[in-house]
Image: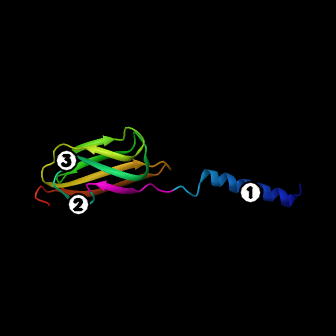
Amino acid sequence: MNTHRSRRFVAANLVFMLAAIFPASAHHQFLRQAFPGARSHAQSVAEVKLVFNGKADAFFSAMQLLDADGSLIAEMTQPKASNQMVLPTPALPPGHYLLKYRALASDGDIVKGDFFFTVDPQNS
C-alpha cells in the first residue's frame, strides 16, 4: 500500500469514527408543547405537562411550580425516561404561576427553561 493510499485510508476511517461519535442527526432537545401553555390563562389546573421532541432522562430532569411570591407549590423529578414530564398540582387558586424545568436530553445536553401562566376561573 503506497503512502498516498494509506493516508486516504486513515482519513476515511477518521471521518467514519467522527461520524459515529457526532452523528448528523444529533440535535438539542426542545420543548414542543406545554399544558397549560406559556403566558396562557386557564380556568383550572390539575397538572402541568411538558412534551419534548425527545426523551427527558430520568432522575435529573425535573420541574418546579412557584406562585407569584416565589413559594414552592409542587415539584417533581422525572421517574423514567420519556418525552413527557407531568407535574401533578394541588388545586391552584387564581393567580400567576411560574414553572421552571430542567431536562437532560438523550444527546447529553441540559435544557432549562421557565414560563408563566395564570389561573383565572373567570376565563372563558
- Residue 64: x and y in percent read 28, 47
Give the numbered dot on residue 116.
none
Q: Is residue 88 magenta?
A: no
Horizontal side of 43 relative to 54 (left or right) equals: left
Identify the image quadrant of the N terminus.
bottom right
Q: Separation of disc 2 and disc 1 at Cα?
A: 52 Å
Going by the picture, which residue comes out furthest to the right? 2
Identify the image quadrant of the C terminus.
bottom left
- Residue 20: x and y in percent read 63, 51
Disc nearer the start of the sequence (2/1):
1
Q: How is the image coloured?
A: rainbow
**Rendered residue at 73%/53% (across/down):** 13
What residue would you read off at disc 2? 40
What residue would you read off at disc 1? 12
**Rendered residue at 10%/58% (across/down):** 122
The quadrant in which residue 119 appears is bottom left
Q: In this picture, which residue range is highlighted in magenta?
A: 27-36
Q: Dot 3, how many residues are within 10 Å of its Cα: few (below 14), some (14-19), or many (20+)?
A: few
- Secondary structure beneath label 2: loop
Give the numbered dot on residue 71.
3
